[in-house]
Image (spheres, coloured by chain):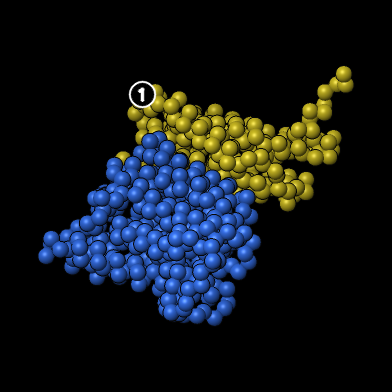
Chain colours: A yellow, B blue
Amino acid sequence: MNIAAQINSILAALVLLTAFGLLVQRRIYGLLHLFAWQGLFLSISTGVVGYVARQHHLYISSILTLALKVIVLPYILHTLIVRLKIHKEVETVVNIPTTMLMGIALVIFSYHLTAPIRELSTLVTRSTIAVALATVMLGLLMMITRRHAVTQIIGFLAMENGLFFAATSATYGMPLVVELGVGLDILIAAFIFGIFFFHIRETFDSLDVEQMARLKEEE
Amino acid sequence: MNVFSPLFVMCLQFIAVLFAAPAFAGWVRMVKCWFQGRKSAGLFQPYRDIFKLLHKDVVLAENASWIFRFTPFLVFGTTVLAGVIIPILSIDLPLSATADAIALVALFTIARFFTALAGLDIGTAFGGMGSSREKTVASMSEPAMLMAIFTVSLVSQSTSISHMVNVIAHGEFVLRPSLAFALLAFILIALAETGRIPVDNPATHLELTMIHEAMILEYSGRHLALIEWAGMMKLFLFTTLGIALFFPWGIAAAGDITFLPVAILLLLIKLFFAGIGLVLIETGLAKMRLFRIQEFLGSAFLFATLGLLSYFMLE
């Protein structure tokens, strides 16, 4: 293992750690910070991979990640949280140890799932594919276990982080056009989510998505 | 000379564990006092405490059985024994072949089990409550501790602590995410096992919040001295075990007696910083509610398991 691969695996471990942190964090501001950290680790990792593999377009995606996921998206979410006046809210997360155990099971599952790819691949980053898939799964688990709309969006964005990481580690990143498109999509999604949050709150007076169960017709 | 060097190292470590542990506990208390803006009682206050307690009479409850009288000696004995298994100054320990990491955890567990029994033995309400809490903490911290140590043994392909330390100290330096996770887990577990602040407060006088202190409320005189001394040694041992497993650079190699003074000096420097780190954690955090401890130790278990997994996934 050369030094760049070591640094990359440390960064992958940090991405995984922040994914678990997102899963169990109760405070909304804490979630936002963790999400920004995850973006930062992702951005550094992309830069390192770009340097090792001499894929210069990865530098651009690294800078794009830094701008979008460390600065712009957390800023938009921060503004939303302040405007919605939920910055002091503490979410009730049910049974954190069980969620953690489920997370561990997902990590093992994704390790097994990616084992054939790891055998085939010759890239420096092949060992981090499992972590990338695990990050996607953990984001999904977060969206399932949380009930707060903002938390679910952060889970969704964490999933996207995982997909981006998977692309970098499996094939040295997607073509630049695709990445630019995805980045733009996410930005627009964040705006639409913002509008949705206000609508959800106006209708239900809360951001708890369980309330949406009330939307069905009377029998 | 080479034949006797392991024995010499063992005797040296025996003395170090016995007599440096109160000084380290004193150092932690001193730094804590400074951080909280109080005047400290000095580095040697723990020695004075132990000395005072050793000269006091023992007051035994009428219904105390042999378990109550036997426990202080057993706790003290197993802790000292653990002190000659952990490579503190040198890797060259004669007992390292007979007792590995699992035996070490078992030694701590025996001490803990008998302390809990002694807490129940007297039949006071606080003793039983403390024992029950201690076992709750133990049931969650011990698996996590074993997992954390197993991560290190995966890296070194052995459960012998001396061998693990040797591989990490003298092998090729590799940045390992698994060891970083294991270190995180180990810190959380060490806080729980030695009864430090987010889990238990060693300086508490409020019986309702006690864990470790509640079990030993009924002890007095030389029994209390031995238990307190063993507690200080346990703190010292956990710190040195952490240093040995994760920052072993500067430990003396096998048969290298001339390096021992340097090893002692480096150990003192590491302990100096470990004490400050411990105090930073303790002053930065508040004591947790008892029912939050399962989350705390659950995350320790999570870190340890992630360490194990990332050894397979990333290395």
Residue at 73 percent across and 51 percent down: it is A88
Q: Amino acid at mark 1?
A: Leu
Residue B266 visible (yes or no): no
Q: At which x and y percent is residue A96?
A: 61, 41
Q: At which x and y percent is residue B22?
A: 41, 72
Residue at 62 percent across and 46 percent down: it is A25
Relative height, residue A168 to residue B130 (above, below)? above
Q: Residue furthest top?
A: A219
Relative height, residue B226 to residue A190 (above, below)? below
Q: Residue furthest front?
A: B62
Judge left or right: residue B173 versus residue B63.
left
Q: For this rendering, which residue is in front, B279 or A131?
A: B279
Residue at 51 percent across and 31 percent down: it is A106
Judge left or right: residue A97 versus residue B157.
right
Chain to which mark 1 belongs? A
Q: Residues within 10 Å of mark 1 (few under 14, many from 20)?
A: few
- What residue would you read off at disc 1? A120
Residue at 54 percent across and 81 percent down: it is B39
Place residue A2 in its image quadrant: top left
Judge left or right: residue B3 versus residue A43.
left
Residue B13 visible (yes or no): yes
Q: Quadrant of the N terminus of chain B?
A: bottom left
Q: For this rendering, which residue is in front, B191 or B19?
A: B19
- Give the secondary structure at mark 1: helix
Place residue B209 in its image quadrant: bottom right
